[in-house]
Amino acid sequence: ARGGERGLGVGSGLRKVMGSSESLVRRLTLENELKGHTGCVNTVRWNNAGTLLVTGSDDTRLHIYDPYGGDLKETVVTGHRGNIFNALFLHHSGDRKIASCAADGEVRLTDLESKDVRLIARHRGMAHKVASCVDDPNLVLSCSEDGCVRMTDLRIKQRVGSRVLIRVGSDMGRVIGLTSMAVHPVNSQTIALAAKDCHTRVFDRRMIPHQPQPTITTRFSVPVVKYTPIEFKDQSEQEQQPLGSGLFYGATGVAYSHDGSSIVSTYHSGKIYLFDTHAHKQCKALATPLTMPRRTTRSSSTTTTRRRRGTTRTNSDDHDDDHDDDATTNQRARREQQAMLDVKMRARNRWADAFHRISSNWDRQHHHHQQQQQQQAS
């Protein structure tokens, strides 16, 4: 959780090591079991401080837990008529406001202080994800299988004050359902979307015109960049089968890294793909075969000769020299790449050692705290 990172005073470099440390994952053990739901739990989200958890379930209820003590602090009857797929604490709300979306296509806002639950948006398909903007907590975003992202301004006093922000579709005019959404952690104007096709799209809210009523020419929004896994690059739109056909390749989830430099997407194929947002043009190029530039030579059906510094050389000799130059360049590039990998590995080992020291100190303090509690209880 973010709160846990801030509490330890962990830098960005150590966060990368913690997030990619296999030894850390292997050391994780069961801390607590939170009980109370009567249906499948579909969403679990931390608050910003890392002290509370909100969960949503098929029983259409929200539960707020103390994850460390295991106490169920509050139960919310949301009024949803379908399975709750996602819920989160709104930023800068003092952990008193929760947005949730469900299979009924509705997005609801719960005020834990006033016990008020109100409908703030309604989709024409199942709503899968809600998001809150850090720099503008009054905006709530939601995505649905109707192919739309809706933006709701909580300052509008209308019963349902949302509007369509993004419409996603194919070049053939087919609506593409959305399965997940992520807001950039630094620039909340940027939104990444996972859809029921082989692409992960990124939109910029500032570049999307307000279109209350879609027209034939402006039916779908244009993304800033579109990422495609290389194994799906040759898949035509006609080959993209719908869910349930056994040949569905759509994305199921999308998330940003802590600094927004990477996007991770999960697909129905069971694979996870990582895209570099700082080099998105190169990432897009990986969707098609890269062609190497060829060295231009004089075409001739026979071997010709030319004079250079008093020597006679044939065209075949020139080709051999070009091949040697390419081989030397490749060797130099491999050496430079290996040197960079060695530097990164040494830096990673230093961060890993620092993390293990911090983790060991935390384990000792936690064990000492448990011993004190046991002595007080006895």
Image: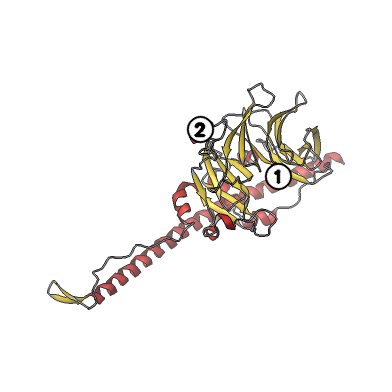
Is residue 54 placed above or below 351 in the rendered structure? above
Q: Which residue is mark 2?
A: 209
Locate residue 180 relative to residue 42 in the image: left or right: left
Amino acid at circle 1: Gln
Residue lying farthest front?
216
Crowding at label 1, few (<14), some or many (≥20) Cα neighbours within 10 Å?
A: few
Residue 14 in view = no
Residue lying farthest bottom?
302
Q: Nearer the viewer, mark 1 or mark 2?
A: 2
Whichever of callouts 1 and 2 sits on the residue coming sooner in the sequence is 2
Amino acid at circle 2: Pro
Q: Which residue is mark 1?
A: 365
Please tell me which residue lies in front, 66 or 37.
Answer: 37
Give the quadrant of the N terminus.
top right
Where in the figure is residue 40, as x and y percent of width and height? 79, 46
Where in the figure is residue 51, as x and y percent of width and height? 71, 37
